[in-house]
Image (spheres, rainbow, N blue to C red):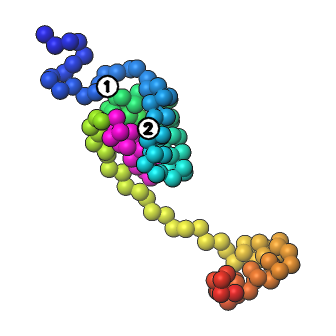
Amino acid sequence: MAPRGHVGSNPTPGANSTTPVSPDDIFNLLWDCKKKGYKPSTIDGFRRSLRSIARNVSLLDSEAVLGFIAKKTVSEARKEVLSDHYGNYCKWKGFAYKRPFYTRVRRLPFLPLEAEVDSLIAGLTGKLSVFCQFVKETGARPGEA
């Protein structure tokens, strides 16, 4: 008879596990990313995402992680980032993870009203005020001005 907790001949690593992942595990992943040449800002994003997930569910239970990400009240873009970062953790750990599909919602950029730009320029002093007024009126790029 198979040991308790195993399902079939090839169980998912960490399935039905409530054991939290040690901070050393996340640190080792981040150290591996640093050795591979990832930028510090990327590594910091991995750290924040994985710690956020690990505070709520075990990183070893991919079904619980998928449920946590799906229920989290954040934008679709943030859910996509969380699932990507968790996918990198799973790849590093060596177990399978099927990444869910999230669609980012594209938004229009913020464009200030002309009155808002005028009040900003009015608050500037000296050469900077003249420079910004010139750029606003001509549409020139800063390097061209």
Asked if the residues shown at circle 1 and circle 2 are in contact, with their CB atoms under 8 angstroms apart, the answer is no
Q: Residue at x 26, y 37 (%)?
A: 96
Percent coordinates x, y for residue 132 in the rendering: 74, 80
Query: Could you say which is closer to the camera, residue 118 or residue 28?
Result: 28
Q: Residue at x 72, y 72 (%)?
A: 116
Left or right? Give the position of 145 relative to 24: right
Magenta region, residue range: 76-93
Q: Amino acid at mark 2?
A: Leu
Compared with 50, 136 (above or below) is below
Percent coordinates x, y for residue 90 in the rendering: 34, 38
Query: Could you say which is closer to the camera, residue 97 or residue 117?
Result: 97
Q: Amino acid at mark 1?
A: Gly
- Pointer 1: what residue? 14
Q: Is residue 110 visible?
A: yes
Percent coordinates x, y for residue 56 in the rendering: 47, 29
- Pointer 2: what residue? 29
Compared with 121, 134 (above or below) is below
Compared with 10, 106 (above or below) is below
- Please tell me how crowded label 2 is: few (under 14), some (14-19), or many (20+) other residues with Cα within 10 Å: some
Image quadrant of residue 92?
top left
Q: Is residue 73 visible?
A: no
Image quadrant occupied by the N terminus: top left
Q: Secondary structure at mark 1?
A: loop
